[in-house]
Image (tube, coloured by chain):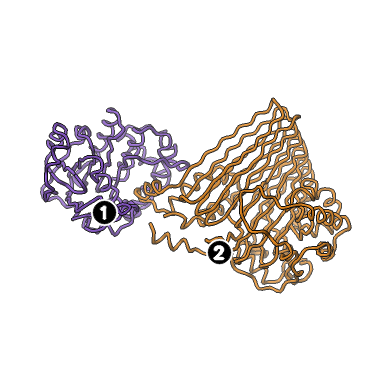
Amino acid sequence: MSASVKTLVNQPYKYGFKTDIEADSLPPGLSEDTVRIISAKKGEPEFMLDFRLRAYRHWLKMTEPVWPAVNYPPIDYQKIVYYSAPKQQQKKQSLEEVDPTLLETFEKLGIPLTEQKRLANVAVDAIFDSVSVATTFREKLAESGVIFCSISEALKEYPDLVQKYIGSVVPPGDNYYAALNSAVFSDGSFVFVPKGVKCPMELSTYFRINNGDSGQFERTLIIAEEGASVSYLEGCTAPMYDTNQLHAAVVELVALDNADIKYSTVQNWYAGDENGKGGIYNFVTKRGLCAGAHSKISWTQVETGSSITWKYPSCVLVGDHSVGEFYSVALTNHCQQADTGTKMVHVGKNTRSTIISKGISAGRSRNSYRGLVKIGPKATGARNYSQCDSMLIGDRAMANTFPYIQVQNEGAKVEHEASTSKIGEDQLFYLAQRGISAEDAVSMMIAGFCKDVFNQLPMEFAVEADRLLSLKLEGSVG
Amino acid sequence: MIVENAATILSIQNLSAEVDGQPILKGFNLEIKAGEIHAIMGRNGSGKSTLSKVLAGHPAYAVTSGKVLFQGQDLLELEAEERARSGLFLAFQYPVEIPGVSNVDFMRAAYNARRKHQGLEELDAFDFEEVIQEKLAVVQMDPSFLTRSVNQGFSGGEKKRNDILQMALLDPVLGILDETDSGLDIDALRVVANGVNQLSHEGNAMLAITHYQRLLDYIVPDYVHVMRDGRLIKTGGKELALELEAKGYDWVDELEPAAVGV
């Protein structure tokens, strides 16, 4: 099995190129002035600056969490560039005004933005380092009342909506990275789906880190009013650098009565080389609030990149009969470390949650599931079902499961199932003896293992996710 | 059956192999012609199972010297999956479980890999369904096993039947049965042996590796070989198996390795 497998081991990270473009960057370092400059550069309303400064002052008093099962050298927050934007006309009214280098970059990433080539039924917000460079289909969405734009634009055009909801799910002092994000976030996407509207197309944001010294701190806010529904997808890549870049995002979702938000992620940040040099630190806070009765928030994530992932997309189920879902595939290879999972907090009556987590660890990687199911005292009739499966490839990878269950209501029902399996030499030999190559064997086994999660992805992306996983694992066996 | 002027399917010449630096096969010789059923018997540790894994191309076993021709082709040059596609089939002593992969999808992938190699068109799921339904009868298997994950939660006997079902599907040139009788009750043994007998024909050959004689009550060999310390020490007809059963392996310990192999 070795010859063909070896050539595949050296398969380069396809998205590892760097775009040469002049940038307007702040010097590295973080102070109250940095926060003020970012806010001023973006011409933000006063309340936003106050929000940032409160977060910054809070952050100064906090310490980095040490409980995740990951190891990395201390981060020097003064060496990070907190704002970097490609130099171009402030806002592109049409795509013709966008720097062609940027359009080319996204095209190379498989995200065509130009009129002729863009995806037919997917609206895209393209974010390059600290700023949004283009949002497609804005006008078409506006016809049905859906607002889809960068958060910077939203702050100018819909300040009241932003003020009402920002920080309402993830408060500025929620945790170390959320506080940092709240102080220095530069851009991100804003989605507002008004009462009774079913968003007519998939929305998606594509994040690209380009600058080698910059951090990316994006902020996404999605609001679905009564009876509204929306499906949103984000994708991420970054060039290959032998240093680490910090990505500390905050995503907040708000679902009112009978609203439905589906949020999918295909995360493929640069993961570092096979010896663990370089790669993105992906320290992200994502939380959805099912504020209304019968509302539903569903997270689906396919995490394949980043050298370190620290991420727990969560649902706070306040509305009675609200539903939270978390479907996750986390794949780690080489020296990657992932500590990821979810929190389902049941507050309202008859709230339901489902957790399906699939962890795949290859190489010398560490992959941990960490999840909390909390049933509050008033959550009569609450139900949770959790299933956490781990798959090990080779004999040097590690998988952990840390489920936390807190039940304060006697009428609740909580189920937890877990399994660990291994792609072993014996299975590969068995399949080889039936004429099936190692690469095909691994993709068959992985596809089978991840089926329950991939079924949740929008169709265009399910195929992509399947392919991405096979690509990531090529060479990890044999 | 022994056929006049039959073509040679497998020719093993002076084969030596080791695992983890430990020599196991030490100058092994054997010729198998089309139509023949061979049995190799021997104590545990005599190298029987190693032989089957070396022939199938298990990566943990290293050939140190010798030559193996399969239908005139140098077998040792081929990767394990290429050996399978050219018609070498190993029924495993312990068929492995593969969670999440459906039995029918797996068998279709295997079947298409072999067909592609033969220059035939690959079958889609619908056409394949017809082919596999027909083969189920060979091992009297319930169709519900097709939609389950490969061997997952199967009993020992069901796993062996599933292997023979694959053999029926792939119609190999050489079928190697590695201790297929181990862990089988008498009914399962009969079903499995019956399946193998149905699949045996003038154009292919079978090599049954076994510790006990009882399998050979059902699969009647043309030749019985006794293996000790990595090579064959005695060859005879089917009566040799009965003699071994009666006298025990101590009886052959006295024998010097002879220039055996048919």
Residue A120 appears anywhere in the view = no
Q: In this view, does A88 lie above or below A228?
A: below
Along the line of sight, the residue nearer the viewer: A459 or A243: A243
Say left or right for A449 vs B139.
Answer: right
Q: Residue furthest top?
A: A411
User: Disc 2, disc 1: CB below 8 Å?
Assistant: no
Along the line of sight, the residue nearer the viewer: A171 or B130: A171
Q: In this view, does A228 lie above or below A11?
A: above
Label 1, on which residue? B17
Residue at 23% x, 54% y is B16
The answer for how far apart the CA atoms under marks 2 and 1 are is: 41 Å
**Amino acid at circle 1:** Ala
Chain letter of the residue carrying label 2: A
For chain A, give the colour. Answer: orange
Q: Do labels 2 and 1 share a chain?
A: no
Chain letter of the residue carrying label 1: B
Tell me, by letter, which chain the rendering colours purple.
Answer: B
Report x, y in % for residue B238: 13, 37
Report x, y in % for residue B154: 40, 34
Say left or right for B226 vs A305.
Answer: left
Residue at 73% x, 40% y is A316
| Residue B178, image quadrant | top left
Residue B2 appears anywhere in the view = yes
Question: Dot 2, how many residues are within 10 Å of its Cα: few (below 14), some (14-19), or many (20+)?
Answer: some
Label 2 secondary element: loop
Question: Dot 1, how many residues are within 10 Å of its Cα: few (below 14), some (14-19), or many (20+)?
Answer: many
Q: In which quarter of the image is the N terminus of chain B?
A: top left
**Amino acid at circle 2:** Lys
Say left or right for B246 vs A335.
Answer: left
Say left or right for A257 vs B17.
Answer: right
Q: Which of marks 2 and 1 is in front?
A: 1
Label 2, on which residue? A14
